[in-house]
Image (cartoon, coloured by chain):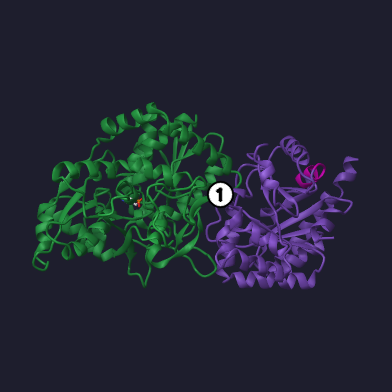
Chain colours: A green, B purple
Amino acid sequence: MSTQPNSYRSQPDERGHFGIFGGRFVAETLMPLVLDLEREYRAAQNDPAFAAEFDDLLTHYVGRPSPLYYAERLTEELRKDAPAGKGAQIWFKRDELNHTGAHKINNCIGQILLARRMGKTRIIAETGAGQHGVATATVCARFGLPCVIYMGARDMERQQPNVFRMKLLGAEVIGVESGARTLKDAMNEALRDWVANVHDTFYIIGTAAGPHPYPELVRDFQSVIGKEARAQLLERTGRLPDLLVAAIGGGSNAIGLFHPFLDDPSVQMLGVEAAGHGLDKEHAASLAGGAPGILHGNRTYLLQDEDGQIDEAHSISAGLDYPGIGPEHAWLRDVGRVDYTSATDKEALDAFQLLCRTEGIIPALEPAHAIAAVAKVALEMDRDAIIVANLCGRGDKDIFTVAEALGTQI
Amino acid sequence: MSRFAAAFAKSHPALVTFVTAGDGDTAAILDALVAGGADVIELGMPFTDPMADGPAIQAANLRSFAAGTTTADILAIAAAFRARHPDIALVLMGYANPMTVRGADWFAAVCKDAGVDGVICVDIPFEEDDSLGPALRAAGVDQIRLATPTTDAARLPAVLDGAGGFLYYVSVAGITGLQQAAQASIEDAVARLRTQTDLPIAVGFGVRTPDQAAQIARVADGVVVGSALVELVAQHGAGAPRHIETFTRSLAAAIHGAKEIAA
Ligand SMILES: Cc1ncc(COP(=O)(O)O)c(C=O)c1O
């Protein structure tokens, strides 16, 4: 696209397209349901009672607003390696303090309210790290709906605490043995369940991807992150941030932070994909290493071979271990509004430990990727520049993975 | 007359058979289907993420990949089939990404060149038709559309707009190979579809036995059998063609005789 749009915040179009990306690539059986969901979402958007209930639950159940925190010790630590005058201020949007420990719950609250409006009586979801599964199981317990979570068998091994959490919350967790037994395979299995149970089942998708209207509604529910961050930083400093940074699996925490700022030209944005063992080896960076294609209901960048077969992704972080990315990110990258980079497993592990030691915060491995990118770019920015990074999850679930990667016996 | 028109103009309902390309000796399996009496052949294009398929066809996809099957191989299988069987209608069935990865025009052209009569793409509803439909129509390859139990009266005209070959009625809301729909619901659906289209109507998903096939053939123009055939490949490996031919013959006898039984 050569001309800039008037607004970067008016996507998608009425067919759910973000430029050439997005859309509704689902089987005919699901299509009427996807259209019902869109109708119901439009009605909810115009219903003040829906917004009031959403806000009330976010405040009293999730614990919002989450703090915006100036990470002074981390800032100072990084400045030690910075050239004179360089070393930006690092602030964290602390969505890891939400109920259930990640941003995922914001979206789950919104979608379960939609499910209830639609009269659905059974909930399904896919999960990678288990954070979305835990958040879904949580809202299902809260609203008394039965819940089935699909999770790759490999992810169940590396995220055992979350598997147990989901079970405690009353969910049925079904291990998926197909493919690489990770998030992509869990999503396939959830779609198979949905198509066989369309009459009573609502599928709570956990990231800003899938058939329209999911990318839009997940973004809207997650935009509470960016809206709060904007107001909080303005109140604390009287100015907008210079740079926003967020990790990208499917892209929901990132789009939630970025979207409210997209039309502020002074605010730059950086999405961080998982580079796994390295971009020339196994990784999960679909923008860096993929090409446009169609999977899981939308057209977007995918890791794939020349025949359009989807490659297996790899990341130490189960939540980023997915060979695609939400369609709005694909569009934002192609129009040049947002920059994207990547961080390797090793860089994420280093950043994970850095945050533990400098700030007393154990981050999830997903935002550890964002912190790794922050540690690099902060050195190139002036000292009065402000970076806001999304600390979208806490690391309790990851301590076993990290211990293993560091060669430590717990 | 197109091969589809010929297949459905016979005095009996058509047997439509599905197997996965590259799973076993596909050429021999296709010949067995024809020898057993199949009227239309659906050749499945394996995909890494077959969201609409049950365990049997998922496993067939994996076997095909393990054998190293590429899109070029599938097209070669199709072209060789066409050379051996000039008159049998051939359909490629699969998912959007392998079909469109080199561009819809490319796919339509190679289908045409290989002698493929029609294409079924599982995950392109009419709302996204511009991703594939116009290219197929321009190349003269029929686009076979799926109608399902959730396709209501309001959607049906748009589903039929641009559809060619035959209409594939997916008789259950679900994935391939698992449950079968109640006969009464199939009869109602076919009657409803007939008021809206002159295309032949083939019914599939969950049809496993000659008896079931015969029941459906009393009301439909065609019956699709897939997973039950694919399971024979899983079970018999290199010996599969012989078993496939026998089973196909039993299906064909049931389907081809169905209308007479009813009369
Ligand atoms: C803490 C956390 N951050 C990020 C992600 C990645 O998802 P998204 O890119 O949609 O934010 C996950 C997914 O499980 C997660 O648990």
Specify the subunit that label 1 lies on. A
Where residue B240 appears, x then y in whole percent?
A: 70, 64
Residue B215 is inside the magenta segment: yes
Residue B206 in sight here: no
Is residue A92 one of those drawn in magenta?
no
Q: Is mark 1 within 8 Å of ligand 1?
A: no
User: Measured along the vertical axis of the image, is residue A202 above or below residue B107?
Assistant: above
Magenta segment boundaries in residue numbering: B212-219
Q: Residues within 10 Å of mark 1 (few under 14, many from 20)?
A: many
Whether residue A29 sits left or right of residue B30 in the image: it is: left
Residue that label 1 marks: A26
Question: Looking at the picture, how far across and down is residue B161, in whole percent?
Answer: 70, 48
Report whether residue B135 is seen. Answer: yes
Marks counted in the figure total 1
Instruction: From the viewer's side, name the closer residue of A115 and B30.
Output: A115
Q: Quadrant location of residue B32?
A: bottom right
Q: Residue furthest top?
A: A49
Q: Residue at horizontal 35%, vertical 36%?
A: A138
Q: Which quadrant of the figure contains the N terminus of chain B? A: bottom right
Q: Is residue B161 above or below residue A312?
A: above
Between residues A293 and A8, which one lies in front from this camera angle? A8
| Horizontal arrangement in the rendering, residue A56 relative to residue A92 (left or right) | right
* Residue at point 31%, 63% (across, down): A341
Identify residue type, mark 1: Val
Q: Position of residue A111 (x, y in %)?
A: 41, 37
Quarter of image, res B179: top right
Query: Is the stretch drawn in magenta largely helix, strand or loop?
Result: helix
Q: Which quadrant of the figure contains the C terminus of chain B? A: top right
Position in image of residue A122 (x %, y %): 48, 34
Residue at the (67%, 73%) spot, across then down:
B76
| Kind of element beneath mark 1 | loop
Q: Is residue B87 above or below residue A142?
A: below
